[in-house]
Amino acid sequence: MKKFIVPSLIALGVLTLAAKAPKDPVLLTVNGTPVTLGEFEYYYHKNDGNEVDHETPEQYLQRFIDYKLKVERARDERQDTTSGFRKDFRDYRRELAEPYMSDTTVYNQLLEAGYQHTLKEVKVDHLMLPLGKNALADSLRQALVGGADFEAIVAEYSIDPQARVDHGHYGFIHAGDFPYEFEEIAFETPLNQWSEVAQTPYGLHIVRPVDERPNIGEIHAAHILAQVEQGADDAEAKQRIDSIYNLLEQGYSFEVLAKTCSDCPSKAKSGDLGFFNRGRMVPEFDDVVFSLENNAYSKPFRTRFGWHIAKKYEERKSSPSEVKGMIKGMMKRDSRNIRPRLARAKQLREEYNSRFDSNVFDALLQQVDQLGYDSVMTLRAADPTPLIFVADSTVTVGEFLGSNYRLNPNDKASTQLANRMDTRLNAVTIAYEDAHLEQKYPEFRNLSNEYRDGLMLVSSLEKNVWNRPAEDPEGLKAYFEANREKYAFSEPRWKGYIIYSLTDSIIGEIDAYLARVKPTPEQLNDSLRANFPGEVRIERAVLPKGENQVVDFIAFGGIRPKFSNRWNHFTTYMGGLINGPEEVADVRNRVTNDWTAALEEEFVAELRKAYPVKVNKKVLKKAK
């Protein structure tokens, strides 16, 4: 029934501009709605692979007409005007359009660069300055390039709290742990050279990579800590950790000693620290634990937290596909998300000759400086003067001002508007491309139309066909009675209710209750659940031998079943063998499917009478 309904998304590669396609001839009209040969061939080839026997275009045409008739009825029923339809179609089209809005070459380059970053760890020196201090950052970078004292500059200017401890020598870092703007300069700048200034939400950054090493992945480790408070004598802690080490050497369990002797909160998990990368712990800890063999423990060693004994359990490395999957997720959330779109916007601006009228814009900016942005926005809100040009479309001065830009009151309004023109040009160009995807790309048009028509068709079929069996039980019963011979059993079946519970004693209570109350089938479920809340599970069965262990046991001489779940006690109610269906409920699924198919045939016959169909046989002969 749903052969045409939901399309599979195609994989889209690097987009190229399609040459102007020849005119697509109209193959048929359905109630006056034209259907082109190209659309027909799209469906024909897509569905041909799903058929056991190959169909010629002439044979397939009748099924295609049936499909289009259903869509035409959905259009008449205005199924495409509902809020649910509009939301579903808008969401799908946005997803389908996304590859056309981005440069896939740039996306893949960013993905590969991110993956390469994960293969190594980089040791960096780092200077961090406040946001907005761009001139200072440029000046300090030039000083550093010229050989200025890095630690002295860090001491005077850096706002990184860690600089008070490491004096700007940041240590080794991993990809994915920092904003991408920082990661990019750290991993892409050549060793021992100063990077360009990068901005993150936290500040301005200048880094110098000074060393790199392979990323060996994560390790799973645990430790025992004899803590030393800052400034305290560590002799007692050293003596205690040595005693623990001696116990380990005598064969005592590391995990037991960690649980009973460690000062770290990880003692609750027997010292387990889970998996972590090198660089996540302090360097002294890393140096020891990453040098251990699997399942080996270290000698006591000191960090600023105290004395440790570490144990390494195992190490692991993610596969390239797993890593790239994680990077794709990060790319959706960080600054990399916009770069493929900006690259695509640049291509489209050239294609569509996107531009703005500099004379009109300069005059607008001068007026903003004279009267203020709010006054100009009110004064020229309906100004029809063309300002931005993209292919055959324009954006007027009034429409530009109507965007109601939020401006910083501390900065000159005209300067802020001038800086936003490039962003607006990109947005208008991308919007123009989005509005013309159906005309420009046949594959997009076919998928978009298929999904739109499919949504409409489903809604119409649900209304006219699929919901009928549930909404018209008397009609379903009448169909069963008229076709009862179709549903005869080839072998006897057991019909009745199987009731499961938690204990044999509860089953006894249920049996006594059923014998006393004798509920009808309609009352059974609610009655048992009300009297045995949470203690009963009920199944209605009409089954032959070999399909259910309980039925086999009670009706066909099978062995008593044993269940591994908690519902391992059972009884039956109103059960017995029948040689054929007694009521429609005994074969509901088969009857429902058959009646639905019959209803759909009637529906199509009605549509063929209601809507005229005209086929151009000359065009059909061109189908391939």
Image: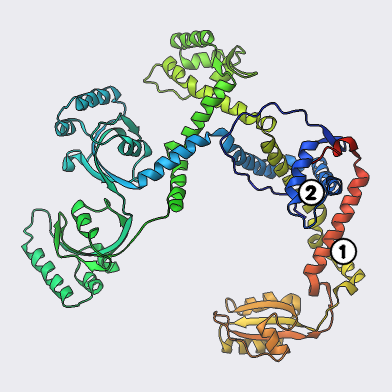
Asked whether disc 1 touches disc 2, contact meaning CB atoms under 8 Å apart, the reply is no
Binning the other alpha carbons within 10 Å of mark 1 as few (below 14), some (14 to 19) or many (20 upward) gives some
For marks 1 and 2, give the CA distance. Answer: 20 Å
Tell me if 403 is positioned left or right of 2 in this view. Answer: left
**Quadrant holding the N terminus:** bottom right
Is residue 161 shown to the viewer in this render? Answer: yes
Q: Quadrant of residue 186?
A: top left
Q: Residue furthest right?
A: 609
Q: Which residue is mark 1?
A: 475
Tell me if 565 is positioned left or right of 139 in this view. Answer: right
**Local secondary structure at mark 2:** helix
**Residue type marked 1:** Gly
Residue nearer the viewer, 394 or 246: 246
**Local secondary structure at mark 1:** helix
Which circle's residue, 1 or 2, is located before the other in the chain?
2
Residue shown at 26% from the left, 36% from the top: 191
Residue nearer the viewer, 38 or 574: 38
Q: Position of residue 42 (x, y in %)?
A: 74, 42
**Residue type marked 2:** Ser
Q: Which residue is mark 2?
A: 460
Residue shown at 68% from the left, 74% from the top: 526
- Label placed on residue 54: none
**Quadrant holding the C terminus:** top right
Residue shown at 18% from the left, 33% from the top: 154
Residue shown at 80% from the left, 56% from the top: 53
Is residue 4 shown to the viewer in this render? Answer: no
- Against 614, residue 393 (above or below) is above
Residue nearer the viewer, 170 or 497: 170
Q: Position of residue 420 (x, y in %)?
A: 47, 21
